[in-house]
Image (cartoon, rainbow, N blue to C red):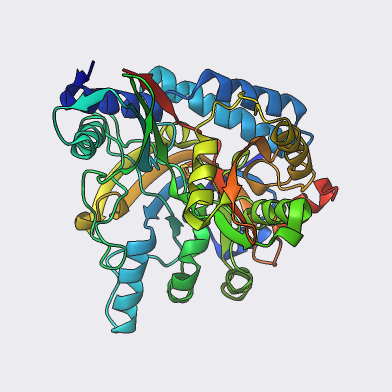
Amino acid sequence: MIREIDVKDISMHVENMLIDACENIPNNVLKALEDAKAKEESPLGKEVIDRIITNDLLARNSHLPICQDTGVVVVFVEVGYDVHFNGDIYEAINEGVRNAYTKGYLRKSVVRHPLDRVNTKDNTPAIVHVEFVPGDKVKIDVAPKGGGSENMSSVHMLIPADGLDGIKKIIMDTVFNGGGKPCPPIIVGVGIGGNLEKSAILAKKALFREIDDESKDPILNKLEKEIKDEINMLGVGPMGFGGTQTCLAVKINCYPCHIASLPVAVNIQCHAARHKSIIL
Amino acid sequence: MEIKQLHLPVSEEELCKLNAGDIVEITGVVYTSRDAAHKRFCDLLKEGKELPIPVEGLAMYYVGPTPAKPGRVIGSAGPTSSYRMDPYSEPLLQQGLKIMIGKGPRSKALKDMLVKYKAIYISAIGGAAASISESIKKCDLICYEDLGAEAVRRMEVEKFFGIVTYDTKGGDLFEQEIKKYKKI
Ligand code: SF4
């Protein structure tokens, strides 16, 4: 049986989720910030995290965007094989973005061409990734992704001989060189394997995992914890003002790759880790 | 935590007394601009034209706020990454700009310029944009409306929280603090 889905519903949900995401920090992110505040050894670092938490609560209670950079919208859509849309799913998503950013008083941060740099004035287009899965459901994940942390991300084509040490070095260097620019405490999304574009998408997808989600892959599970601890020894600290709490979580996703390759992508997410999800 | 009150405009003498790591609350007028407006400023100066805003002795805040909801002065208004303004900063310092407010580390060249022109760089807390908007008491659009969030605004701020990050003597808060906590 084919299930019909009205694309107008998609627009409506995308709109609601984006406004909600921009104003409402997820509880598990807030909890991670509280934990980091308790553990932070730098007095200034503690003060910074305290002010971030105060901000996030004010945003939630007063319906204000947590951060003025309400980002470029990244959407992952999982479409069941048995679903049929009655219209253009991409346009439906963009319609939701348009409505959210105009009605929701969110900042429009997209230019129509990277070189002429004219603002599109409604924050479209979104960056949309569609995947097909078994079943008759549609899962939509949205995240307004800020430019500050995105700019501190990178992709590297390592070789097999670089191994785990090579991967760790890339991650540590990326975080250390970013310093305070991506608004730490950060979440680090890592994609290992695939090829150039696959590794980047894996890293992005890793950031869509809940902050308290633990990898089911035993190797990655251990690695995520290990790398988080090592990042927190870099000394960068909240907003780069020094401290022990640079990173709230590390999320690693991987995929098979060529015998000659070891692609690694590192996608940085700032403390304003905004994300909403719905299953239709 | 001791907080120093910084009233704008500030004399060079007073500015030179501030050190990297000082916590300040800023009260007075700041002008806003980001990448696109900076580029226009520099193009104007290159052509020998006047800037649309006064900069001598003043403070520039790197911010692109969200639109104000009804009844509010401004939307959320936290700092943007300052290093992107480094390539445009010298002409403005030559015009007498004294305080830059943003977030994150900047180039060595910029730090040297601050020493040369006796100016300072203050960090606001990135992402604390809703809280920061509470310290903005008045906000007027000055020019470049076509740039949307990147338009130039004049803001009157009161007790705007900041941390002196680079001072007039080459002091660098990031450098001083990170090494204290670096264990690898
Ligand atoms: S990096 Fe994140 S918290 Fe910082 S300004 Fe950008 S969106 Fe906001």
Q: Considering only vertical position in the picture, is B41 above or below A121?
A: below
Q: In this view of the protein, can residue B26 be seen by the observer? A: no
The furthest residue to the right: B183
Image-quadrant location for residue A155: bottom right
Q: Residue B123 location, x and y as percent?
A: 57, 50
The quarter of the picture where residue A112 lies is bottom left
Number of on-image labels: 0
Residue positioned 55% across, 47% down in the render:
A267
B51, above or below A121, in the image:
below
The percent position of residue B26, horizontal first and vertical second, equals 51, 45
Residue A132 visible in rendering: yes
Tell me what residue is drawn at x 17 percent, y 36 percent: A88
Q: Nearer the viewer, residue A54 or B156?
A: A54
- Residue B146 appears at what percent x and percent y? 19, 57
Image position of A209 (left or right of A168) = left
In this view, the residue in front, B79 or A171, is: A171
Which residue shows up at 30% across the image and 84% down it? Answer: B48
- The residue most toward the left is A86
Residue A129 lies, with reference to residue A158, above or below; the image says above
Residue A80, by quadrant, is: top left
Q: Nearer the viewer, residue A139 or B59?
A: A139
Residue A61, given in percent of the width and then of the height, sits at 41, 17
Q: Is residue B158 left or right of residue A6?
A: right
Q: Is residue A60 left or right of residue A194?
A: left
Q: Is residue A27 left or right of residue A122?
A: right
> Quadrant location of the N terminus of chain B?
top right
